[in-house]
Image: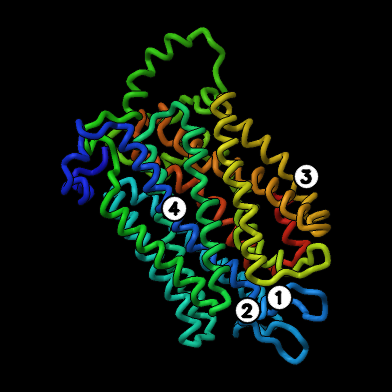
Amino acid sequence: MQPSSRTLAPIVVLIPTLKPPHKTLLFHQICVLVLTFLAYASFHASRKPPSIVKSVLGPNVQSNFTESRSSSTRVSFDSNGTDSGWEPFDGPQGTHRLGELDLAFLGSYAVGMYFAGHIGDRIDLRLFLVFGMMGSGLLTIVFGLGYWLDVHLLGYFVGVQIACGLFQSIGWPCVVAVVGNWFGKAKRGLIMGVWTSHTSVGNIIGSVVASGVLEYGWGWSFVLPGILVILIGVLIFLSLVVAPEDLGFESPGEEFEMNVGAADVETSEKPESEEAGLLHTSNVKDVGSSDAIGFLEAWRLPGVAPFAFCLFFSKLVAYTFLYWLPFYIRHTAVAGVHLTHKTAGILSTVFDIGGVLGGILAGFISDKIEARAVTSIGFLFLSMPALVLYRTYGSISMLANVSLMFVSGMLVNGPYSLITTAVAADLGTQSMVKGNSRALATVTAIIDAVFLIRLARTEIKEKLSERKWFAYGIVAQ
């Protein structure tokens, strides 16, 4: 159970007909899926603007070649015909400093994930999630205000990114824990495969919004996504119910746990599944269902460390695309034509559209074959040739670029989505913790943060040139 101090959502309190028996468990499960989907999609929408404005802030490509450019796009040029950018990102070290912004965000995000998951297991998840959304939205707006305030201090942008990373780290452990409270293990892969498309949907929304208003000034690319996060945060505060017990329903996780004995009898003569073997151990202590799991105890749970490092390789590529794909497209001629800032940003959404299908497909396959690890490894291996093909042939034509980007997004985001949702929920509610859903946020935070610390360290080392950009993806896979 969650802490007794947890409060019920105001809308549920004000409208008694939303409580049972007027509304069924299925109705509230759908509401939880929709609300958490919107919450994390808004988080990702507010993360996308930095990648969209990179090509505007930093020094851009030479203008002495064929280029598709909108006359209304506000881009200034120096005497040599090069985009002048925005100080302090406009000099020879411009892209390096843009990478330092990513370092600031991802470093604080990774550190915050450890603490956020630990705290989320112990306090009201609804209020904690809303706190993270409000802070993220305000700081995203503050970053954009640098445009109108004519801020050119690197420290200002770095400081905002550090603070924003801490607030953003609250989102993922909270939404995964809430969904884990409402759903049992059956069809978890498919359900969470569909649900986890919020990441790609958020990226798409963020890309379209940020690219659409870029011509009016890059500050708007941050202000609008920031406002979106705040509005969704208000909706979450008013509507989200953290656990079925709050409305008098029986927890699906506890029901699954109570049926484990019968299931074991029925399947005692069947071969052990992949997950049964993976999660089996005699060295980990059982954790009571009413106690939040400790940080070291979470690391000792079987399967947590291997899947955490597996996610590192998958998410390394996904986040490289998240932060640098529009920049790469802007600097790479497609069929001999260099695209505008706006077009490059919108075109990058193809990767996320493929990611939606990849997450659903990975979840469906893992449910069918009952093998999360095999599914993840299969997608990772297939993504290697896909990335090579995109790097080699993506510039031949727009059709080739779009097709190969879609396939790459599907294969890269498949295991990423599967591990951060279904696998994390499986590990956080396995028999070793007796269905303890309060372990969910801690386990999820650990799995996610391992990757982010490693990626943040790579950002400071060197600028991402075109060939290095793809080398990260290929080597990671």
What separation in Å lies between label 1 and label 3 (alpha carbons)? 32 Å
Residue position for label 3: 385
Q: Callout 4: helix, strand or loop?
A: helix
Residue position for label 2: 73
Q: Coloured how?
A: rainbow
Kind of residue indicated by mark 1? Arg
Q: Residue at x 76, y 86 (%)?
A: 81
Kind of residue indicated by mark 2? Thr
The single residue placed furthest to the front in the displayed view is 71
Question: Depth check: 115 or 203 in front?
Answer: 203
Kind of residue indicated by mark 3? Pro
Label 2 close to label 4 by CB (< 8 Å): no
Q: Callout 3: helix, strand or loop?
A: helix
Q: Position of residue 117 (x, y in %)?
A: 39, 49
Pick whichever of labels 1 and 3 is earlier in the sequence.
1
Pick whichever of labels 4 and 1 is earlier in the sequence.
4
Residue position for label 4: 40
